[in-house]
């Protein structure tokens, strides 16, 4: 463990030096397209978000069924996080992979095993479309997944399913402080705009992904005002017990203050032993900030129901 720590610190220092000297010009955002088979039955008027565990949720709205960050390991199972680091799962998912309904697409914030585990890599249908980062899309193709769509920040994909329309835009995310980026996978948040007019969506949802608070997040409400629901990846994940790589409770409240969603659901907490900031941290901070009435708390298996937004 001491050797791993020393190597980690050395690589982090070197990568920080390299990144500090690198300067890149942001490319123009791209628009991709995906057409899905039309639904066989009319869509329900209301939508739902079901919390399965970790960052895994089922989103159902306007005929779309979307799975986020699929992780279906059970209590006592371990995930590999890279560099010889593992983490033990402390909970069970609300559903097993085999119990899922038919899925239209997966939204994957990044490629870590606590978001796309070995079981999913082996058993998930290789033809399900996966919307993710460019680097994750390439790695997923190498695993045999046939329909991967890689997005850079602010890239978007327009999705059709019969008469239903959905636009997903990649939002900023950073899975650690600047000097650690070379050691960690690229991360994206996601903005989901449901309806035929993405500029005035029937419902706007934001999924934070495994990010920390940094300045680029302030562009989200500028580009996407009026977020109806935010799903916040919390947990205060710490690598080697030291380096924070996901938001803790205080950070989650800060992100609410930045994005200003009408409602927020905390996810990605208490499920793995590297999660060091329990849900109670966030609940305390939200109450202190006067935001507790905007928060919806879901236990594993619980469902939040929503209707079309009033804009």
Image (cartoon, grey):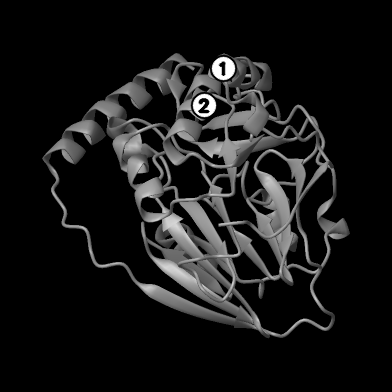
Residue 75, picture quadrant = top right
Residue 144 visible in the shown view = no
Name the quarter where the C terminus is drawn: bottom right
Left or right of 310: which side holds 45?
right
Q: Secondary structure at mark 2?
A: helix
Q: Residue at x 65, y 42 (%)?
A: 55
Q: Position of residue 93 (x, y in %)?
A: 81, 41
Q: Mark 1 touching mark 2, by CB under 8 A?
A: yes
Reading the chain from its start, which is encountered first: label 1 or label 2?
Answer: 2
Q: CA distance from mark 1 to mark 2?
A: 7 Å
Q: Which residue is mark 1?
A: 285
Residue 50 seen? yes
Horizontal placement of 216 versus 37: left or right?
A: left
Q: Secondary structure at mark 1?
A: helix
Vertical side of 97 occupied by 281: above or below: above
Q: Residues within 10 Å of mark 1 (few under 14, many from 20)?
A: some
Crowding around mark 2 (Cα neighbors within 10 Å: few <14, some 14 to 19, many 20+) is many
Using the image as rendered, state which of residue 283 and residue 125 is in the foreground: 283
Q: Give residue 42's position: percent from left, percent from top.
A: 82, 78
Question: Residue 289 at what x, y percent from top left?
Answer: 53, 19
Q: Nearer the viewer, residue 124 or 66?
A: 66
Where is residue 142 shown, x and y percent of the image? Answer: 52, 67
- Residue drawn at (13%, 48%) of the image: 23
Tell me if residue 269 comes above or below residue 201 in the rendering.
above
Q: Residue furthest front?
A: 311
Camera-side residue: 64 or 4?
64
Compared with 311, 177 (above or below) is above
Determine which of the numbered discs, if any, sits on residue 253 in the image: 2
């Amino acid at each position: 463990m001491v050797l791993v720590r020393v190597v980690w610190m050395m690589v982090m220092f070197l990568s920080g030096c390299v990144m500090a000297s690198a300067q890149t010009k942001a490319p123009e955002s791209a628009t991709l397209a995906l057409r899905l088979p039309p639904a066989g039955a009319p869509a329900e008027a209301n939508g739902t978000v079901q919390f399965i565990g970790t960052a895994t949720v089922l989103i159902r709205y306007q005929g779309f069924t979307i799975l986020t960050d699929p992780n279906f390991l059970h209590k006592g199972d371990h995930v590999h996080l890279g560099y010889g680091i593992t983490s033990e799962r402390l909970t069970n998912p609300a559903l097993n992979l085999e119990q899922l309904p038919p899925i239209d697409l997966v939204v994957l914030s990044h490629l870590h095993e606590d978001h796309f585990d070995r079981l999913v890599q082996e058993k998930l249908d290789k033809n399900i479309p996966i919307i993710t980062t460019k680097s994750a899309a390439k790695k997923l193709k190498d695993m045999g997944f046939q329909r991967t769509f890689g997005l850079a920040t602010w890239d978007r994909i327009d999705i059709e399913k019969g008469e239903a329309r959905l636009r997903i835009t990649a939002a900023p995310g950073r899975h650690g402080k600047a000097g650690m980026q070379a050691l960690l996978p690229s991360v994206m948040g996601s903005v989901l705009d449901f309806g035929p007019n993405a500029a005035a969506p029937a419902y706007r949802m934001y999924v934070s992904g495994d990010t920390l608070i940094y300045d680029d997040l302030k562009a989200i409400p500028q580009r996407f005002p009026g977020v109806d629901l935010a799903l916040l990846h919390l947990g205060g994940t710490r690598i080697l017990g030291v380096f924070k790589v996901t938001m803790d409770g205080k950070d989650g409240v800060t992100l609410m203050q930045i994005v200003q969603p009408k409602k927020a659901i905390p996810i990605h907490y208490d499920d793995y032993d590297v999660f060091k900031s329990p849900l109670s941290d966030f609940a305390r901070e939200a109450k202190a900030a006067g935001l507790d009435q905007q928060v919806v708390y879901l236990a594993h298996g619980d469902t939040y129901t929503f209707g079309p937004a009033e804009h």
